[in-house]
Amino acid sequence: MFRYRMRKKSKIYIVCFCVFALLFVSIWLVDRNVHPILVQIAKTEAKRLAQEAIVEGIEEQVKMGNQLNQVMSIQKDDQGNISFIQINPQVQAKIYQNTTNKIQESLKHLKDKPIEISLGQALDSNIFANYGPPLSVNLWPKGTVKVSLVPKLESQGINMVMVTLIAKIKTEMDLIIPFTEELLHVEVDYPIAQALVVGKVPNYYFYNDQGTVKQMPVPPVK
């Protein structure tokens, strides 16, 4: 009887050891093979959702109406060529405030919309891509949204220049993935105002947020 009990306990220990060993190997395989694919899929989908939220926030600037037409003034020299671009500080401040608030509000809604990735996708399987239990990935805004306005000049033919005011948006998101956490950098460039001006594309022009001197490169003429 005693030997029987010892053998029974030994079998239990062996079974437990095998179960833990199998579990350890499974976790190791997931971390080594599945996790990188899961992170890549999650980053791609999260960046898409974050960019959509940012664009939604920027598009609110359309409600500013005629104020957007007053956001920049283009100064010319005696020969009629563009010398510098002046940004209206009052309109600029309003754009910064409205855009930042709306984008942060849009990004906060992403917390309530977890990204679901099927196990088949994480395994990088074409056959079982839509099968398997879903793995939830959460997005959390981190820090503040940074907004800056930058003009872009492009030649539009003989003596014609297209001046586009670009809103450059930068922010960071925490990507909460099973077993890990990733920092996601999101950047979006969005045109908010345009003007077609008679003149030549200068070799350089003067601009910064306060309207004082700063040299910036101009894209090459296409």
Image: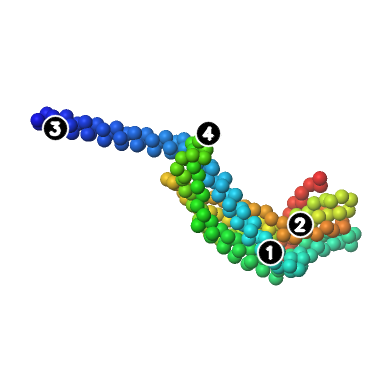
Q: Residues within 10 Å of mark 4 (few under 14, many from 20)?
A: few
Quarter that holds the C terminus: top right
* Contact flag, marks 2 and 4 (Cβ < 8 Å): no
Q: CA distance from mark 1 to mark 3?
A: 78 Å
Nearest the viewer among 24 and 115 is 115
Residue at 90%, 59% in the rendered image: 79
Pointer 4: what residue? 127
What element does badge 1 sit on? Answer: helix
Q: In the image, which is nearer the foreground, mark 1 or mark 4?
A: 4
* Amino acid on which disc 1 is placed: Gln
Q: Residues within 10 Å of mark 2 (few under 14, many from 20)?
A: some
Nearest the viewer among 73 and 16 is 16
Pointer 3: what residue? 5
Of pointers 2 and 1, the one earlier in the residue sequence: 1
* Amino acid on which disc 3 is placed: Arg
Pointer 2: what residue? 164
Q: CA distance from mark 1 to mark 4?
A: 44 Å
Q: CA distance from mark 2 to mark 3?
A: 84 Å
Pointer 1: what residue? 61
Q: CA distance from mark 2 to mark 4?
A: 46 Å
Q: In the image, which is nearer the foreground, mark 3 or mark 4?
A: 4
What element does badge 4 sit on? Answer: loop
* Amino acid on which disc 2 is placed: Thr
The reply to whether residue 103 is visible in this rendering is: yes
Residue at 63%, 67% in the rendered image: 97
